[in-house]
Amino acid sequence: MSSPTVRRSTRLRNTTSISPAQPSSAIPAASAKRALDDATPVVRPKKRRLKAGSLKMVGEMPYEILVEIFSYALEPMDLYNLSRANPVLHALLLSKSLAPALWEDAFKRVPDLPRCPAGLILPAYAELMYGRGCYYCPSVRDLFTVWKCYVRVCTDCFMSKFVEVPKDKIGVLHNIVPLTDGPKRLKLPPSSSCLREDYERQVAAMENIMGNKKRWTEYVAQACMQKNARDNFHDIMQRREHTRKEREVTKIRTERKNAIMAKLHALGYTPETIQTDNSWNMKREKGLGDLPGFKVLKPLTDGDWAKISPKIIAFCHAHLIKHRTEMFRSFYDKYLAEDPKTRKTAPRFSEVLKMEPFKSTVYESPPSRTVTKEDFQQYRVQLPGLLQEWKEAACAKLVRLIQQSPVVHGSGNGRPATPEFSVLDLATTVFSCKRCSKPLFYPRVLSHACPTQTHFGNSPVLDSTIWDGGGLDEVAYDPAHAIKVVTAFGKDPATATTKEMDEYNQRVECLRCRIDLRIPRRLFMPWRLAIWHESKRRERRHDTEDRGGGGWRMADAELLAAVLAKERELPEKVGIEPIVLLTD
């Protein structure tokens, strides 16, 4: 007999109500899970929103759309990176039905890439070209690509996966097994190692056909062709890798150079005012590119610039000054060419550059200011006064030098103890340069190069020279040779002037040269050249004492006529007086 039907409301009421007759132990206890949840709060992971561009949903896209996307301007490196992005793309790009066309189109977009070698599929070729890991372990350091074997290995795996070919078999295997040098750090013998599996396979194959000459010949010929193909591929990839590295180096250096030039341009330095290289410089002076830190193979950072900027800025500023100096020199030379009279007593351009306003224009103008010839041209009217002031100060220094010389205070020289400016016009007022040993007459001594020569090409520096407070250490007062020569000309050394000696059309003969040479030739020369000749003989210590009446003899009328006639036959040379040799 079936139990009576109980209404649903009655069942619910019976389960939720507690009868007083029921013991408390009959009440079902709360579950253990509920008790644990009540005692310890559960920390549930937060739901994260997927980032835009996530590849998680790519697998849900139709393959036709993916193929269309991948066939649009993607290169082999792009496909290789996508194949490693997630399993879905990996399966798609390695699919035998869909992937080959994608890879072929991608490789066509890189025309300079060598053709895929025989025995490799295109994805494997892409792995060989663009992969960044070892083929046998997860290592990504100390990698070495063996193009002949189509593998990329680390140093440890090279030692375990490659074997050195035994010397007794090198003759046979050399023609059929690709041999490599190995990483340079291992310092292995050249062309002595091969892939272990290739070596074992070739040895086993050769042992199987050892007795069959025909099969042996065919096998070796085929293996040689395969080996030659791998060698050619190796050569192509080596050249390509070398070219790629050169391009990378050039790119990095160019970007670093452009960054440095941009910073210099912001400071006011331009390529027109600095020497960026030394390719045209015959003196092989250092260019900007030769400075430390300029050719470093890494991008320029603020820290790098802080380290290398002092030397670079100093170099650029020096060449900026040189550029302005050459500009002023051109202006100054043109000014002197228009006034030959001033040119005789004018100082060198380096001395004028120490005068205002030229000094401030060249040395004190900021790099951002472009100095032109017009900046010097506006001060042209001030040049005559500046040059006259300089000449008076320089002449006063020369007079003081003469006054301090012991020759002035000696006996029998006829020089006043307190000479005036007129003493500079005397024929015996001769100075000697301590650098080149040339005798210097007034006013030639004012523009002689040695006392004002600098060490920065043709650009002067603001160091003191003999004319602006640096002393007269470079020039010495040396009238001894001039006194002897002027006396030989029959003139009074105390009163004879340079003008008088120039107008006195006479020549003297060096008696000592005639005696020393012991040949029938006689040497005649004018007075200035005779002084130079006298100083050179003393400098070379040809004479220890005077011979032949002081060593000089004035030509008589007959000899003078012959000498002058001989001089007219000689080619004229500007600034060089002739020496005449007469034969008895």
Image: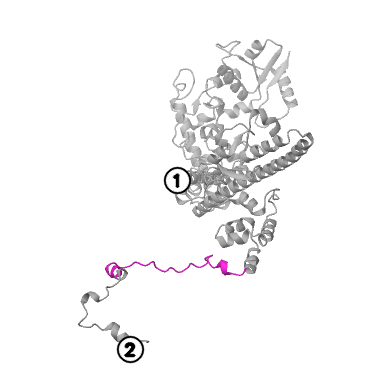
Label ID, residue 307: 1
Determine crowd level at label 1: few under 14, some 14-19, many 20+ residues with C-alpha closer than 10 A.
few
From what the image shows, is residue 147 above or below residue 450? below
Q: CA distance from mark 2 to mark 1?
A: 90 Å
Which residue is more in the foreground, 169 or 48? Answer: 169
Disc 2: which residue: 9
| Membership of 37 in magenta stretch | yes
Q: Quadrant of residue 516?
A: top right
Residue range of the region highlighted in magenta in the rendering? 35-62
Residue 88 location (% of width, % of height): 57, 62
Quadrant assignment for the C terminus: top right
Element at badge 1? helix
Residue 344 location (% of width, % of height): 58, 37
Element at badge 2? helix
Number of disc labels: 2
**Residue at horizontal 28 percent and vertical 73 percent from the top:** 30
Q: Quadrant of residue 561?
A: top right
